[in-house]
Image (cartoon, rainbow, N blue to C red):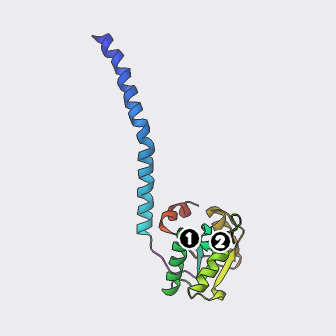
Amino acid sequence: MNGIYRRSRPRRRRWLILFLLPLLPVLWGGYQAASILYIWKTSEPVKAPVAVILGAAVWDGKPSPAFRERLDVAVSLYEQNLTERFFCTGGTPGGEPPEATVCAKYLEAHGVPSRAISQETASRSTWENLTNARALLQAEGQDQILVVTHGFHLKRALIQ
């Protein structure tokens, strides 16, 4: 009886491992989704002299839906007097105008004066958006900023 028991025990472990291994990515994905949702829903804008708008995709010279969402948040912040100035970030991913230029045009079209908009067109990633903006704003003496992105991207921006 002991010999049979011992032989069947490794099979149970194998089945358990084969069952749990595919679950790990699902559990990890669920955790990530929950943390993104939590950060998104619990974040509140604060008043800051400068808002840095993180770049996103440009399609046919216009902001993609995700980028437009960020820009609409920025316009709302301006209308609520939570910021006085915007710093648009994002370079040219290929064939399209720079994300920062599209950002500036969108803001101007929605009532933000051009004197309240600066651009940084060298960056190509969230990391570069934040690093380049930080260097330029610190050179101006700005130490408090508001980062503008959309909810799904917020966790990634905070990690950067």
Out of 130 and 107, give the one closest to the viewer. 107
Residue at horizontal 40 percent and vertical 36 percent from the top: 20
Counting residues from the N terminus, which is met first, the one under dot 1 or under dot 2?
A: 1
Q: Quick check: 5 above or below 61? A: above
Question: In the depicted view, which residue is nearer to us: 138 or 69?
Answer: 69
Magenta-drawn stretch, dominant element (helix, strand or loop): loop
Amino acid type, residue under disc 1 in the picture: Phe
* Farthest residue, direction left: 1
Helix, strand or loop at disc 1? helix
Residue at the far front in the pictured view: 60
- In the rendered image, the quadrant that contains the N terminus is top left
Residue name at image x 38 percent, y 26 percent:
13
State the extent of the magenta-drawn residues as a range: 44-48
Relative image position of residue 105 (x, y in whole percent): 63, 81
Tell me whether the residue at label 1 lies in contact with that at label 2, contact meaning CB atoms closer than 8 angstroms.
yes
Q: Is residue 84 visible?
A: no
Quadrant position of the C terminus in the picture = bottom right
Question: Could you say where residue 54 lies in the image, as x and y percent from the top left?
Answer: 60, 70
How many residues crowd mark 2 within 10 Å: few (<14), some (14–19), many (20+)? many
Look at the image and say whether residue 53 sits in the magenta stretch. Answer: no
Q: Is residue 27 above or below residue 90?
A: above
Measuring 63% from the left and 86% from the top, which residue is drawn there? 116
Location of mark 1 (residue): 67
**According to the image, label 2 marks what residue?**
99
Give the answer, above or below, for where 140 lies relative to 28: below
Q: Element type at marker 2?
A: helix
Find residue 109 and name its label. Answer: none
What's the distance in space between the residues labelled 1 and 2, CA to CA? 9 Å
Residue at 50%, 69% (x, y): give it.
150
Give residue 85's quadrant in the image.
bottom right
Q: What is the crowding at mark 1: few (fewer than 14 residues within 10 Å), some, or many (at least 20)?
A: many
